[in-house]
Amino acid sequence: MPTNDQEAQLAAIQSEINSVPQISREVEKLQDGCSLMLEFLDNNIVLSKVTSLWKGESGRYTGIRYARRDGNCFYRSAAFAILEALVNDKKLATEFHKHISGISSRLVEDYGNFVEDFCHCALEVVEKIVSGKCTTVEQLYELSTDIDYEYTLYFFRYAVSNYIRSHEEDFLPFVMGLNYDSVNSFCAAEVDAVASESDNVQVVAFARCFKVCIVVEYLDNSEGSYTTRHTFGEGTTDSPEASWIEVTLLYRPGHYDLLYK
């Protein structure tokens, strides 16, 4: 068990985490001197990859929205990106509402009353966009800071968990490679658990479950001057099975933020 000093240290760390906004209100411009660049000034390998996000021919991004480092950063960033896209396209919002209504029904059927509040909160946020009560990104940001909004993130978590469990053949080889003997044990530890971090398995399941294309730029200490890009989910086309929305994230070990082109 943790000693009193360790408990005090953990409490101080958690307090510091909680003092950071769940997601930044403003999109910071990616440029020399931005917060992301300053974070890696003493690491030349990573720094060159950071600046490649906006410099030269590879410069594809203009801004970044930071997420709190609390284990929920993937769901928080991806959910905000989706909702932001819905604010800008009411027809898309209506289609997405129908889609997550079906997901909600499956979750309640499989998990019972335990998930009803999560589903209700997620549907309510999208309903506010569809009905015109939330028409700007600023209004969306205010919704995302409401205490009940955390239930929306739980909805996304349990939807991902349910998707993995119901597509066991697709995911079992990957979770076994992570030393889990079943998708159920993996989901219990790595998806259902609040603040559990997300890796490729969760990202793939999220993209498939919500029919989005997720582009992740990986920032690490590997050789090279550019971030490594991975794409999860199908590209956006006119096909009925196509992704509706593209979500672009920056990943450094243990953390995701939201990128803007």
Image: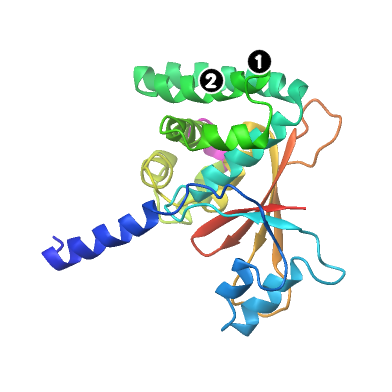
Residue 124 horizontal side relative to residue 84, left or right? left
Q: Residues within 10 Å of mark 1 (few under 14, many from 20)?
A: few
Along the viewing direction, whichever of 181 and 164 lies nearer the viewer: 164
| Badge 2 vs badge 1, beta-carbon distance below 8 Å | no
The residue located at (59%, 72%) in the rendering is 220
Q: Position of residue 189 (x, y in %)?
A: 36, 46
Which residue in the protein does label 1 denote? 131
Query: Reading the chain from its start, which is encountered first: label 2 or label 1?
Result: 2
Q: Residues within 10 Å of mark 2 (few under 14, many from 20)?
A: some
The residue located at (48%, 23%) in the rendering is 121
Q: Is residue 31 above or below residue 171?
A: below
Q: Is residue 200 above or below residue 171?
A: below
Q: Position of residue 161 (x, y in %)?
A: 47, 36
Disc on res. 46: none
Q: Position of residue 162 (x, y in %)?
A: 48, 31
The residue located at (54%, 35%) in the rendering is 142
When asked about the image quadrant of residue 34, the answer is: bottom right
Residue 211 horizontal side relative to residue 165, left or right? right
The amino acid pointed to by label 1 is Ser
Q: Secondary structure at mark 1?
A: helix
Residue 222 horizontal side relative to residue 21, left or right? right
Which residue in the protein does label 2 denote? 124
Q: Secondary structure at mark 2?
A: helix
When asked about the image quadrant of residue 235, the answer is: top right
Along the viewing direction, whichever of 158 and 144 lies nearer the viewer: 144
The amino acid pointed to by label 2 is Glu
Q: Is residue 189 above or below residue 162?
A: below
Residue 164 horizontal side relative to residue 112, left or right? right
Along the viewing direction, whichever of 183 and 55 lies nearer the viewer: 55
Magenta-tinted stretch: 165-170
